[in-house]
Amino acid sequence: MKDQNHLNKRKNRLKGNNYKIAVIGGGPAGIMAAISAAKALSSKKSSKNSSSKKYSNKGPNSQEVVLIERNDILGKKLLLTGGGRCNITNNSDLKTHLNSFGEKSSFLKPSLYNFDNKSLLEFFNDKGLDFKIENQGKVYPIDDKASSVLKVLENYLQEYNVKLFKGALVKDIKGKDSGFDIFIKRAPESCTEKSKKIKGMDLIKASKVIIATGGLSYSSAGSTGDGLKFAKNYGHSLTPTIPGLVPLKVKEEWIKDLSGLKLENIGISFRKPSKKRISHVGTILLTHFGLSGPGILDLSREISTLNYQFHKSVHSSANDDSNQNKLQKDIFPLELFLDLIPEKSNEELRDKFNLEFSKSGKTLIKNYLKNFIPNNFITPFLIHSDINPKKELNQISRKEKNRLIINLKDLKIHISGLMPFKSAMVTCGGINHKNINSKTMESKLVEGMYFAGEIIEFCGLSGGYNLQMAFSTGYTAGNGASNSLT
C-alpha cells in the first residue's frame, strides 16, 4: 500500500509536465530557441483554428514549450558580455560573419542567413529597444545595459507563454519512442524561493528536445559541459574543446604594473613554429596578469589552437620513454609583438624622427612621444627601451633612435601562458557539425534532438559574432523542432 501511495504521488507530481518541446539552457541560444519554437507553434495553432473556424480554449497561448535553466536567473552569462554592455552582434555582412568563424563556417550559413543581424535587431526593436554602432561595427543597446537585452527576451518568453523551470539541473535525458524523458533535480539551497517552486519534480516529458547548454567557458555562469556529455552519450562525436578568446599571461612585470591602461588600434602578432606570423589589428588592455582586450582575445584563438596541437603531438611522442624527460610542457614562453604605430612603416617613422628630432631638439623625448602613445605608457616604455625619459631629442643617439623605432614597431612581449578556461569568453570545439543538419539544427543521429549555440564546435572572433551565432542557431533550432511536429 505504501509503495502504491508513493507511485500515486509521483504520478500526480508529473501530471501536466508533458510538453511538445523542451529547451535545456537559458542562455541566448536557449532563450531564442524557446521563443521561436513557441511562436511557430502559436502560428500553426492559430492558422489551424482559423481554417477550421473553431475556437480552442487552450488557444495559441497554451504552454507547449518549456525552458529549463540550472541557474536561478536566465541569461547569467549574457549579463556579463561586453563588460555588462552586451555587444549583441556586428553590423557587418554575412560573408564577414562567416569568415569570423574560420574553416567549415559554411555550416552556419543557413542560420545566419535566415536570422541575420538585421532580423535580430528588428526582433528587439519591436519591443522598444534601440541600438548603437561603435568601432569595428560592434552593436550595443542604446543604454549600454545587457539587462535591457535580457528584459526583452523575458518579455517574449512571457508573451508566448513559455514555461520556465529555473534552478533546475538536468541530470539525464532518456530517448523514448514518443520523445524524451528529461530528469531534473532542484538546484542547491542557494537558489531563490522562485526556483524552489519545482521542489520534488524529477521528470519532464517532451516530444522534442533542444540542447543549448553552452561550452566550458564562464563555468561560474553555469557552462560546465553537461550538454556535451549528453550528446556524447547519444553517439555524437566531439571536437577538442579549448579556450577561445582568452586573456594572456606575460612575463614582463612592467606591463603588469600598467594594469588598466588601454592601447587602441595597434598591430598584434606572434610567430608560429613555421616562422609564419599571425597578425591582427585591435585594442589591447594591460592587466595585472598580462594582456586582454579585443585584439588579444582574437589572436588568442590561434595561440590556444597551437598550444593544443603541440600537446597532442607531445602525447603521441610520449610512448618513447627516452623522450619523456626531454619533452617541453607547452609552447610557452611565446614571443608576441606589438606594433604601436601600425599606420607608419619603419622607414616613414625614421624619416619623421630625423626631421623632427633636429627641428625640435630641445623637446624632451617623453613629451615628444605623447604624439604617438598614451602618456602613462611613455616612461615605462622608454625605461624598457633603455632610454632616459628626460633626454632631449637632440641628445638621442643613433643606437637609441634605432631601439626606439624597433620597440615602437615591434615591441617584444613574452607570453607565459593562457588564462584558465573559466576566463575564456567562448569555447572552441564541441559537437562536430557533421552530426547536425545545418538547415534545422537537428541531430543526424537522434531524431527529435536539436542543438544550438556554443555547444556546437564553432567559435568566432570577438565583436558580437558569437552572440549572433547563438541567437541565429537558436532561432533555427526552435523553428526546426516546431516544424517537425505534426
Image: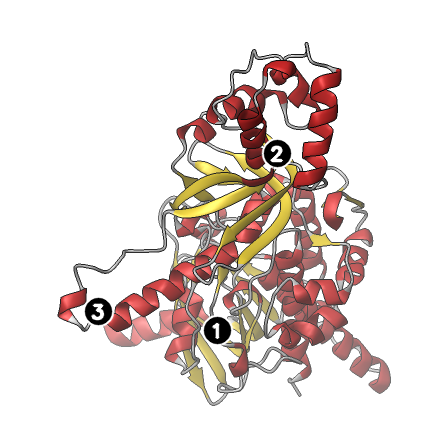
Q: Position of residue 327 (x, y in %)?
A: 24, 60
Image side of residue 213 versus residue 341, left or right: left
Tag 2 secondary structure: strand
Please tell me whether mark 3 or mark 1 is closer to you in this view: 3
Image side of residue 136 versus residue 164, left or right: right
Q: Earlier in the sequence, mark 3 or mark 1?
A: 3
Q: Earlier in the sequence, mark 3 or mark 2?
A: 2
In the image, is residue 288 above or below residue 77? Answer: above
Instruction: Identify the residue at horizontal 37%, vertical 69% (top origin).
Output: 9
Amino acid at pointer 3: Ala
* Image quadrant containing the N terminus: bottom left
Q: Position of residue 76 (x, y in %)?
A: 53, 48
Tag 3 secondary structure: loop
Q: Earlier in the sequence, mark 1 or mark 2?
A: 2
Instruction: Identify the residue at horizontal 55%, vertical 83% (top origin).
Output: 448
Judging by the rendered image, the residue that carries numbered circle 2 is: 263
